[in-house]
Amino acid sequence: MAGSTRIERKTAIITGTTSGLGRSLARTWAAQGARVVATGRRTALGCELEKEVRDQGHELTFIPADVSRSADCEAVARMAVERHGGVDILVNNAGIEGPVTDAHGISDDEWEAVFGINMGGTFRMARAVIPVMKERGGCILNISSINADEALAHMAAYNASKAAILQFSRTLAVEYLLDGIRSNAIILGGVRGGETGERTQDGIARYVRGPEYQRPKADSDDPLAEFVLQDPDEVAELLAVLCSDALRLMTGATIALDRAMTAGFTSSMMIHMSTANLLQAG
């Protein structure tokens, strides 16, 4: 797989690398020969990642950064240029899921925090790297979610922010097509190892069952959990392929890596279970 992705010696900025998919992306891409510039807000975890990857003989630089701050985003882009001469790939992965509550219960600060990182961070990092990419082209991957297409109750801010990313990604594709900059949005379902996903699942469970409810952890042998939660390393491998020069005609696309969830799998399963009277009140 590594030889076929063609990201060797490409400079890739990846945001949100201190946990979950971002961490897998950084490790996997560095092992494939990319020059990774990794960012995140938790400096200690980022430095651990940098040491781990460098000890394996690969190239990764961690830069502490908060994508809700323009100055941080500009500093990341500047560092990539100073160290590697340019930017070939940007993965806007950093995101938060925000509160699990009714829409009318979300405060201004909570709403703005979710949009400031999810949509605002995607915009700020793209704005920082596009002038550099205009010199030789590049590829931008904007990580969205099934929530952009399938509204999940009690997650209004997250749903709306992830939907906004889709249209922003298309806009970049149209505006910078003639500059050789590709922009694609990635719809993901659940990814194993994501801390925010675990917290959100706990929050939803408590919302439905009461504030004292403790959600049992998923059984690693549960076939449904195995099906729904994707392997982050597998996702990282596929995203590397999408950055290949062989796919330079693919831009402005919304690519669902969600095991047919936005295609209708979830609603199909619910309708069939309801029709067969398999849904019982707990």
Image (cartoon, grey):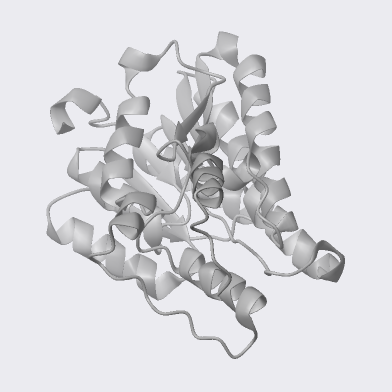
Residue 56's spot in the image, x, y percent? 12, 56
Residue 1's spot in the image, x, y percent? 16, 31
Viewer-nearest residue: 76 or 280: 280
Q: Is residue 115 left or right of residue 35?
A: right
Q: Establish if 246 lies above or below 169.
A: above
Residue shown at 29%/51% (left/top)?
Answer: 231
Q: Establish if 86 lies above or below 210.
A: above
Residue 222 visible to an observer of this rendering? yes
Q: Quadrant of residue 249?
A: top left
Q: Is residue 111 left or right of residue 201?
A: right
Residue shown at 53%/35% (left/top)?
Answer: 264
Residue 120 visible to an observer of this rendering? no
Viewer-nearest residue: 24 or 79: 24
Residue 194's spot in the image, x, y percent? 42, 63
Give the number of callouts.
0
Residue shown at 41%/29% (left/top)?
Answer: 88
Q: Is residue 91 left or right of residue 58?
A: right
Viewer-nearest residue: 25 or 130: 25
**Quarter of the image with the C terminus in it:** bottom right
Residue at the extreme bottom of the image, as rendered = 212
Residue 26's spot in the image, x, y percent? 32, 50
Residue shown at 41%/79% (left/top)?
Answer: 216
Q: Is residue 248 left or right of residue 104?
A: left
Q: Establish if 212 lies above or below 197.
A: below
Q: Establish if 246 lies above or below 151.
A: above
